[in-house]
Image (cartoon, rainbow, N blue to C red):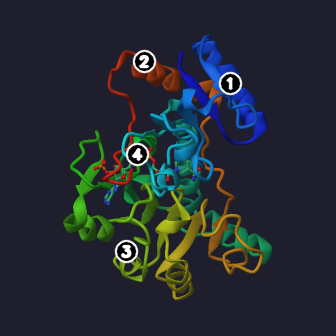
Amino acid sequence: VTALIVYGRPEWRARWSACLHAHLPDLDIRTPENPGNPADITCLLGSIPPEGFAALYPNLRVIFSEGAGVDIILGLRLPPQVMVVRIVDDTLSAMMTEYIVWSVLTLHRNIPAYRASQTAHQWQRIPATLAANRRVGILGLGALGTDAAHALRRFDFTVAGWSRSPRDVDGVACYHGADMLDSFLARTDILVCLLPLTPETRGIIDAELLARLPRGAAFINAARGGHVVQEDLIAALDEGQIAHAILDVTTPEPLPPENPIWAHPGITLTPHVASIATPESASASIAENIRRLEAGSPLLHLADRSRGY
Ligand code: NAP
């Protein structure tokens, strides 16, 4: 019988346990308060493993992240035999797609400018642009970026995506690699970041990248705060290179009260709520991976430790 230890907030642990037991009634689920013999434990569920977990659980084989991002886990010193699994899940993708569609439509339909007009009691119309004439560019064409791209296509936006390796997504102009980044940016009116945070992508949204977008472009970040050089984004907003930014993620989180993002008129901020994996939905794939582990089969949705995602 596999023994799995669940970390995280107590109410979430109870939900994970109930949902995992619905799929695998015999799974031996432990908690940090009642770990039993730590040498039994082969699986850990949680996005922030405890300090010294490797020494604590010498037979650990798999860490299941509670979310799609595994940057924190991969940033830890992991023993070579430990595999890291991220969550790929329809509910998580659908929720992220809602957020991206909401934010693209908000920018496309000039809602930040209308909000400012309302505050100033000004009845001021802005000529509308057809969705087909609005070019959205998605950095990251993985599980989340691809789902969002399909949804935006249904509104008739002109959509492109950028990935590390070549991708083929129906109706989406696909760019990849550093060499194609310039042409991708030059054709992008609304830039969406859905990249994983890796040594290669940290700080990718800097002054140089923002300057390569058409003047007055908009920016949406629903990935990680670490992708953005905050001073560069604020400077680009202040001088009009970027018209508006919608940020779900910041560095640090929570954002300190004195941070300039709070009061910036060119920024709409949400507190890292774009999408979350629910135990009710994501337990099925974790259970499937535990069955695979027991059968000695390859696991699904493994993070590649050398790539960093
Ligand atoms: P994923 O399936 O691993 O996709 C990542 C995409 O980024 C892939 O297309 C990948 O290229 C591309 N990529 C990675 N490194 C790159 C590089 N150096 N240059 C160009 N492209 C690169 O990840 P996902 O499941 O879509 O999740 C994306 C991120 O969203 C997560 O890592 C997490 O940080 C964030 N997230 C945020 C929230 C929130 O609530 N704000 C919720 C969930 C997830 P390849 O296709 O070539 O591999």
Nearer to the camera, 233 or 158:
233
| Image: 102 above or below 227 | above
Report the mark closest to the observer, 3 or 1: 1
| Image: 43 above or below 150 | above
The location of residue 158, given as percent across then percent down, is 36, 53
Instruction: Say which residue label 1 marks.
Output: 17
Residue type beneath disc 3: Leu
Instruction: Say which residue label 3 marks.
Output: 213
Q: Which of the 4 quarters of the picture holds residue 207?
A: bottom left
Residue type beneath disc 1: Ser
Q: CA distance from mark 2 to mark 4?
A: 36 Å
Nearer to the camera, 245 or 109:
245
The location of residue 165, given as percent across then percent down, is 23, 51
**Upstream in sequence: badge 2 or badge 4:** 4
Q: CA distance from mark 2 to mark 1?
A: 19 Å
Report the mark closest to the observer, 2 or 4: 2
Residue type beneath disc 2: Glu
Q: Residue at x 19, y 67 (%)?
A: 179
Q: Residue at x 37, y 76 (%)?
A: 209
Instruction: Say which residue label 2 marks.
Output: 294
Q: CA distance from mark 4 to mark 1?
A: 34 Å
Q: The residue tagged with tag 1: helix, strand or loop?
A: helix
| Image: 204 above or below 287 | below
Q: Are marks 2 and 1 in contact (CB under 8 Å)?
A: no
